[in-house]
């Protein structure tokens, strides 16, 4: 009997399949290892998506915030006192540490008052006395709105006057005396963590509960850094589960970055400084990139920005500058530091000169494949010394906020109504919390008052409106209703971007109706002649003012944003599609406090008492007749488009596209003298961007040169198809080689 190895003519290995199959399987595993990371990226692209993922449907939310968050004032006050005023070596709180604040209530003299508790993390390597942390507690003066320091009992914080037995109130501008110094070892829970780091959230939980004994706890808070989600502190998990600050409902953070090591930070700063010197980046762009990679640098930058605008202690003062710097970004994103934000920074050398920033208007918008918005504002040139940068900051902030509001609320809410008989239907409640709502309603009031003023019989238009009084005929009257609606917006689309060429508004009018009958008891028979004169003489002047007068500049700004938002809506694609009609405008609250009811009441007063009360006398024969003259919404629900062809756009605006392209690098002027300032909003996209929009407008005949990001849908498909094609080729080659080997073996036998 012969003994030997069994031959398998088919080439199949009994240990588990064809040798070629095993090689192919290995290749597939390797390819999947390369491709699977691309599948995981879109699920949590950007900080916005991450923050939404952490939201607890039970009520607790962790979300990014902007530097205009009202609680940020207390963080900046703490930084001013304990990072910059406090000498080094005296428990100074460096930028590497985290500062957070929570409001809570305590009882002072029998009354509950709100206090703002601000502190930093401790333990581990922090401070010369790591077992202690500095605590600042503030109350806000209800009359002035100014914060002032108090002790742990809520009484004004006092300190000794040098070389005297007297005391004085602690001034945050000049003193670093804390409200309290908290010994972490006094809490057994914190004492066990001191060898490592006791994070700020744990310190606040202990201090609010055990020292202040605040039974109401803290329902909101703001931290410089996003709570950690690992290690012994695990702040994010413990907040979500209510194990620390159990009554917390809204905990916000300014940055999700972590600290770079000091050597890495120094290396990055050196590299960025070299790029600035070489002209590859502006100073603001370098700072923005530094802050996007290092939390400590962000902390320093945020405080510098607060100081640059005068160290405001009220959020509305800080808001316009902050929101302008973060135009077309979502809370938690880093600003681009591009042409516009650099010009509006109000820092020495940042003003390019010759620009009236109060005239800023949004005239270009696009979105690139990574979800970043690219925008350009037009502005008028000026030879004056005052470039009105503060007004420009407000204008940019209003247009950016309005864009997100127009996306977030459904068009059915885009109306305001000043009607004396409908006090309960003035404005949508959510729209009323925004600057858009304030601007629309006040513009409606201003428009109605202007129309009334133009009918004053002492004016030339009023004389035509009222006509010549006659003793032989009844005095005429008319009651009309006016409202503002969009005319077709003239736009041009190119390379995935929108140029807003013109966005006119129209003022409409009609005779008022009461219960189906024209007129009211004060005007039972309205005059058709007066209505005709109103439409032909008064109305055109009102419409001209709405489209050109400085009194309606805010309305025109937010309407430009409405045009841009409507264009974005109609594309049905992009990184912000999940935001459309979601109803959440909490991030874009009104910069300026206001009340819709107060505007309504002002209109009712104007309507019932009149804008004028004029008496004229006319003698006829032996009789003197006395004639008495008295006078008495905005709907942006739809935006019609009038799209220009390429030929028409180039004929009417031959160099506008080139000026917009150049504006992303520096301020650029077109042949009409209009100045253009472009920038990029680093929006953290909550979804993968589909389509092929350009980052910056390209030449008309040029094709896109932007490489598709490797993590985009099209990029993933490209990688996948390419890999499969390569795999087919490899399999074919290996199969042919195996066939040749089998043929050679057969011939040998």
Image (cartoon, grey):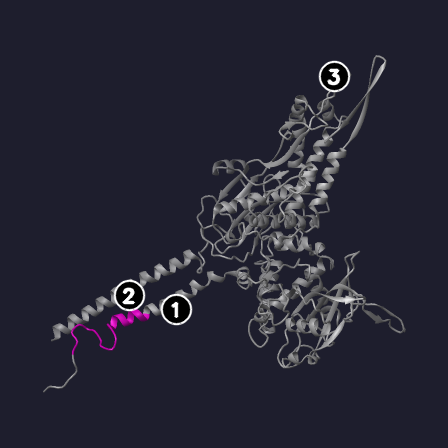
Q: Nearer the viewer, mark 3 or mark 2?
A: 3
Image location of residue 250, percent across then percent down: 62, 62
The residue pinned by badge 2 equals: 730
Q: N-terminal of the two: label 3 or label 2?
A: 3
Work out whether residue 265 can be spotted: yes
Q: Is residue 150 left or right of residue 679?
A: right
Q: Are marks 3 and 2 in contact (CB under 8 Å)?
A: no
Left/right placement of residue 172 relative to residue 568 reads right
Q: Residues within 10 Å of mark 1 (few under 14, many from 20)?
A: few
Q: Residue at x 58, y 50 (%)?
A: 404
Q: Are marks 2 and 1 in contact (CB under 8 Å)?
A: no
How many callouts does the rendering have? Answer: 3
What's drawn in magenta, residue-wise? 7-26
Quarter of the image that includes the N terminus = bottom left
Q: Which residue is mark 1?
A: 33
> In 3D space, how far apart are the residues under numbered discs 3 and 2 (Cα atoms)?
101 Å
Q: Residue furthest left?
A: 1
2 or 1: tag closer to the N-terminus: 1
Which residue sits at x=89%, y=71%? 166
Q: Is residue 610 above or below residue 41?
A: above
Q: Residue at x 28, y 65 (%)?
A: 730
Task: Tell me the SS state at disc 2.
Answer: helix
How far apart marks 2 and 1 lie (CA) works out to: 18 Å
Judged left or right of residue 455, residue 673 is left
């Amino acid at each position: 009997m012969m003994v030997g190895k069994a031959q398998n003519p088919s080439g199949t290995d009994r240990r588990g399949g064809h040798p070629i199959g095993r090689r192919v399987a290995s290749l597939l595993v390797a390819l999947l290892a390369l491709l699977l990371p691309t599948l995981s990226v879109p699920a949590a692209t950007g900080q916005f998506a991450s923050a939404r993922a952490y939201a607890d449907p039970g009520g607790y939310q962790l979300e990014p915030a902007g530097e205009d968050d009202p609680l940020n004032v207390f963080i900046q006050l703490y930084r001013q006192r304990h990072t910059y005023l406090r000498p080094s070596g005296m428990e100074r709180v460096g930028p590497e540490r985290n500062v957070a604040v929570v409001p809570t209530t305590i009882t002072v003299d029998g009354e509950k008052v709100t206090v703002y508790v601000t502190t930093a993390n401790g333990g581990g390597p922090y401070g010369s006395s790591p077992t202690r942390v500095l605590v600042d507690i503030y109350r806000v003066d209800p009359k002035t709105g100014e914060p002032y320091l108090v002790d742990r009992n809520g009484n004004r914080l006092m300190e000794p006057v040098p070389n005297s037995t007297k005391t004085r109130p602690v001034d945050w501008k000049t003193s670093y005396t804390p409200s309290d110094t908290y010994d972490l070892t006094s809490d057994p829970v914190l004492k066990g963590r001191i060898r490592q780091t006791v994070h700020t959230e744990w310190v606040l939980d202990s201090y609010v509960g055990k020292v202040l004994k605040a039974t109401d706890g803290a329902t909101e808070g703001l931290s410089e850094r996003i709570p950690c989600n690992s290690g012994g502190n695990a702040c994010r998990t413990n907040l979500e589960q209510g194990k620390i600050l159990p009554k917390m409902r809204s905990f916000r953070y300014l940055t999700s970055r972590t600290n770079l090591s000091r050597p890495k930070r120094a290396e990055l700063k050196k590299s960025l400084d070299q790029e600035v010197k070489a002209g590859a980046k502006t100073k603001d762009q370098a700072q923005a990139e530094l802050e996007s990679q290092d939390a400590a640098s962000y902390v320093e930058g945020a405080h510098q920005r607060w100081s640059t605008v005068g160290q405001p202690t009220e959020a509305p003062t800080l808001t316009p500058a902050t929101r302008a710097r973060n135009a077309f970004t979502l809370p938690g994103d880093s600003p681009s530091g591009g042409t516009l934000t650099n010009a509006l920074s109000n820092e020495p050398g940042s003003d390019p000169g010759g620009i009236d920033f109060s005239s800023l208007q949004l005239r270009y918008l696009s979105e690139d494949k990574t979800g970043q918005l690219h925008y350009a504002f037009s502005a008028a040139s000026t030879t004056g010394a005052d470039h009105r940068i503060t007004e420009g900051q407000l204008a940019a902030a209003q247009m950016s906020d309005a864009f997100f509001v127009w996306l977030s609320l459904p068009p059915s809410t885009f109306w305001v109504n000043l009607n004396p008989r409908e006090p309960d239907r003035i404005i949508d409640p959510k729209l009323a919390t925004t600057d858009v709502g304030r601007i629309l309603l006040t513009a409606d009031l201003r428009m109605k008052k202007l129309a009334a003023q133009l009918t004053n019989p002492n004016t030339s238009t009023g004389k035509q409106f009222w006509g010549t009084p006659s003793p032989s005929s009844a005095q005429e009257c008319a009651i009309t209703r006016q409202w503002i609606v969009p005319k077709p917006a003239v736009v041009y689309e190119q390379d995935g971007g929108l140029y807003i060429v013109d966005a006119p508004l129209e003022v409409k009018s009609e005779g008022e109706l009461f219960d189906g009958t024209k007129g009211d008891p004060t005007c039972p028979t309205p005059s058709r002649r007066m209505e005709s004169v109103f439409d032909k003489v008064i109305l055109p002047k009102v419409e001209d003012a709405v489209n050109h007068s400085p009194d309606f500049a805010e309305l025109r700004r937010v309407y430009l944003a409405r045009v841009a938002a409507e264009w974005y809506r109609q594309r049905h694609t992009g990184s912000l599609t999940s935001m459309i009609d979601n109803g959440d405008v909490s991030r874009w609250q009104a910069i300026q406090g206001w009340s819709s009811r107060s505007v309504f009441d002002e209109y009712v007063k104007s309507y019932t008492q009149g804008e004028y009360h004029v008496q004229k006398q006319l003698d006829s024969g032996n009789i003197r007749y006395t004639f008495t003259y008295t006078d008495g919404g905005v709907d942006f629900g739809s935006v019609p488009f009038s799209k220009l062809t390429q030929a028409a756009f180039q004929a009417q605006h031959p160099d506008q596209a080139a000026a917009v392209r150049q504006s992303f690098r520096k301020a650029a002027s077109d042949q009409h003298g209009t100045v253009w300032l472009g920038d990029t909003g680093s929006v953290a996209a909550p979804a993968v961007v589909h389509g092929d929009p350009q980052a910056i407008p390209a030449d008309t005949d040029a094709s896109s040169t932007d490489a598709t990001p490797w993590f985009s849908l099209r990029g993933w498909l490209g990688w996948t198809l390419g890999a499969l094609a390569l795999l087919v080729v490899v399999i074919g080659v290996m199969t042919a080689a195996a066939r040749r080997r089998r043929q050679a073996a057969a011939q040998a036998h």
